[in-house]
Image (spheres, grey):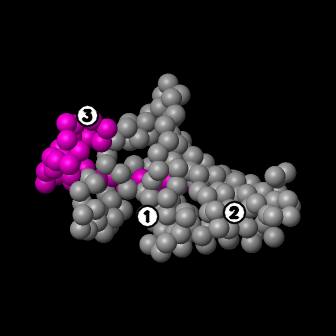
Amino acid sequence: MLNDLFQEAWTALKFAASGKEHPFNYCSLATAGKNGTTRQRTVILRGVTEEKSLLFYTDFRSTKIKQLKQNPKANGLFYDPKNQLQLIIKGNILIHTDDDAWEEHKDKIDGKAINYYNTLLPPGKPIKNPFSVERGKKLHFGLLEFKPVRMEFLKIKQDSNHLRARFRLDEGIWKQTFLVP
């Protein structure tokens, strides 16, 4: 049964990353800086690799990049209200800004999405008019590769027999155990 829960989680994540509509398309990603200050933001799941890494896009000038350079640990929170499934994923994030993986994903950006990564000022800077953001030709695109080391699975059941499990990566093998909900 634990293997089924593990597969259910990864199947849902892969489906969401495929571009099809799914609640896991968006998740909350939390990071902490050197001084322990945490920040959360909603990010879009862009891919799931064969090695079970989760991929997100960002402007490499953003605050999350500064935090991740100081401390690569992160938590992701995914929730599917229809299936009442929550995943909490803990791991480390690698930042890609100029390698083959970055190149591959940079080439997938099209249309108006390019505007997320070409502003003259970095994200979070004050501006006078939100309808006239200055843009340039330079692309400030970064690829985040979230490498999970732990996942908690919680499925809420109407009969109060909720299912909760923990999956922990230990020397390349996912160890599995049920938890009290």
Is residue 18 shown to the viewer in this render? no
Residue 121 lies in the magenta stretch: yes
| Three-letter amino acid code at the position of disc 3 | Pro
Callout 3: 10 Å neighbours few (<14), some, many (20+)? few
The stretch of residues the image draws in magenta is 118-147
Residue nearest the observer in this picture, 37 or 112: 112
Residue 39: % across, % down: 49, 37
Q: Which mark is residue 126?
A: 3
> Quadrant where the N terminus lies?
bottom right
The residue wearing badge 2 is: 84
| Three-letter amino acid code at the position of disc 1 | Arg
Instruction: Measure how far apart labels 2 and 1 are at the Cα level.
Output: 22 Å
> In this rendering, which labeled residue sits more in front, label 2 or label 1?
2
Residue under the point 44% across and 72% down: 19
Instruction: Measure how far apart labels 3 and 1 are at the Cα level.
Output: 28 Å
The residue wearing badge 1 is: 46
Residue under the point 31% across and 38% down: 124
Callout 2: 10 Å neighbours few (<14), some, many (20+)? few
The residue tagged with tag 1: helix, strand or loop? loop
Residue 70: % across, % down: 44, 33
